[in-house]
Amino acid sequence: SAVVEVPERRETVKREALAVARLRPSPSSLFPLGSPSLLKSPTQVKLWCDCPFWPDDGMCRLRDCSVCECPENEFPEPFKRSFSHGLSPDDLVCQEGKPHAAVDRTIDKAFKGWLEIDNPWTNDDETNNDEMTYVNLQLNPERYTGYTGPSARRIWDAIYTENCPSYPSGECCPEKRILYKLISGLHSSISIHIAADYLLDEAKNLWGQNLTLLYDRVLRYPDRVRNLYFNFLLVLRAVTKAADYLEQAEYETGNSEEDLKTQSLMRRLLYNSKLQAACPVPFDEAKLWKGQSEPELKQELQRQFRNISALMDCVGCEKCRLWGKLQVLGLGTALKILFSVDGDESHESLRQTLQLQRNEVIALMNLLNRLSESVKFVHEMGPSVETIMEGQ
Ligand code: FAD
């Protein structure tokens, strides 16, 4: 039964994750957009949910597909003290799947100013922290994992055909095509990250770029590139809109040096996004969904997006699920921000209406980072890859 299988699976994952953590040190590249310090901050995710649609069929081919939870030294200080009680140094290497890796709710007291409020756009109950674990995203980069075949295909098919029916054919109104464009843009971004960090030679453990894959999956389809840009602009617009709120939020983890860095990087990012806001609006959501059917449209989009969020629990590769869930939460947060103000666009009004959780902000900033990395990669590599591929 599922009740027996879950602990067994966790046990296997733990051993694999430990091996991976020892073999491969953390890559710590910085990012063109997004706050590195906030990105480094442990991220809370609920990785172990049952798929509501199909039986579990984990399809990982590589060890790299398993997720390593945070070692204790990366936990925020207040949590570290209560957590480290009675643990040997060995226990602190990787907490993957261990019973004592279960998250202590007292950690949330460390994040003053952040609310526990459910996101209506996503399927997970974000207020239920008992089932969540902490993960360092830099130890678990989004890249090639070997997850492919019917399991992966079934997820994408379900997302496109069940949740965005007939969207690509252009039969729907522009508002309804938003969901298709967002998912397609996210799909492009995931493919781009696979192409940017690909396992070229398994025997030699050689990683590098796979430009053929970049071309075959994304560049040769201009609409997929356009959808990536659309997604990026929508998320950037959401960050700009919530800039005042985000600027005043507290980023306290107990590590004052990291906290100051985070605050300063957030201010810089928000200042830059406000400068962009002075230019023509990159994406005007008001034009898209301020028609007469706005409340029904919002409800319908919300229902479809929650379905997509639920499908993330069916992703049969842990690392893909981690990034899938995180980025879908990021998109849900962007939509929550864009839909949160009715008519009145003033900052004061937004501050009063909008309520975000710490985890939503982390997801939003990481999504912005992933999308901006993808845009950068396409911008840098696209022209030469197209010239080579189309000349063949
Ligand atoms: P797929 O990428 O599976 O695409 C399936 C079909 O969707 C295509 O044939 C095409 O018709 C259509 N399609 C493709 N791209 C687009 C687009 N941008 N817009 C519209 N339609 C499109 N693999 C990893 O190696 N690392 C990961 O981190 C990772 N994360 C994943 C996260 C999620 C949520 C999912 C569902 C899968 C993830 N995968 C990951 C698997 C990966 O996305 C592919 O499914 C896998 O590499 C197989 O690729 P494929 O060539 O069969 O085409």
Image: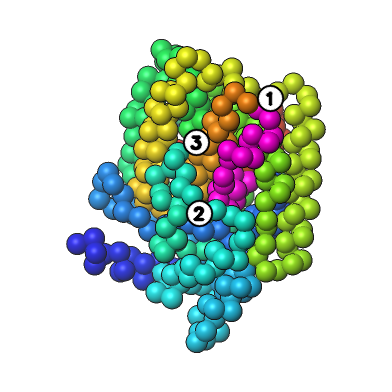
Image location (x, y in percent) of residue 332:
50, 39
**Magenta part of the chain:** 345-366
Task: Give the foreground label among 1 and 2.
Answer: 2
Image quarter of residue 122: top left
The residue under label 1 is which amino acid type? Pro
Where on the image, by quarter, is ligand 1? top left
Residue placed under numbered mark 1 in the picture? 282
Task: Give the foreground label among 3 and 2.
Answer: 2
The residue under label 3 is which amino acid type? His
Image location (x, y in percent) of residue 29:
70, 55
Q: Is mark 2 within 8 Å of ligand 1?
A: no
* Picture residue at 38% right of the left edge, 33% below the top: 303
| Marks 1,2: beta carbons within 8 A | no
The residue under label 2 is which amino acid type? Glu
User: Tag 3: Cα neighbours inside 10 Å, few (<14), some, or many (≥20)?
Assistant: some
Residue placed under numbered mark 2 in the picture? 116
Looking at the picture, does residue 196 appear above or below residue 296? below
Residue placed under numbered mark 3 in the picture? 187
Image location (x, y in percent) of residue 167:
42, 20
**Which structural element holds mark 1?**
loop
Q: Quadrant of the N terminus?
A: bottom left
Q: Quadrant of the C terminus?
A: top right
N-terminal-most mark, 3 or 2: 2
Residue 20 forms part of the magenta stretch: no
**Which structural element holds mark 3?**
helix
N-terminal-most mark, 1 or 2: 2
* Picture residue at 73% right of the left edge, 63% below the top: 258
Image location (x, y in percent) of residue 84:
54, 81
N-terminal-most mark, 1 or 3: 3
Q: CA distance from mark 1 to mark 3?
A: 21 Å
* Dominant SS type (magenta): helix
Q: Is mark 3 within 8 Å of ligand 1?
A: yes
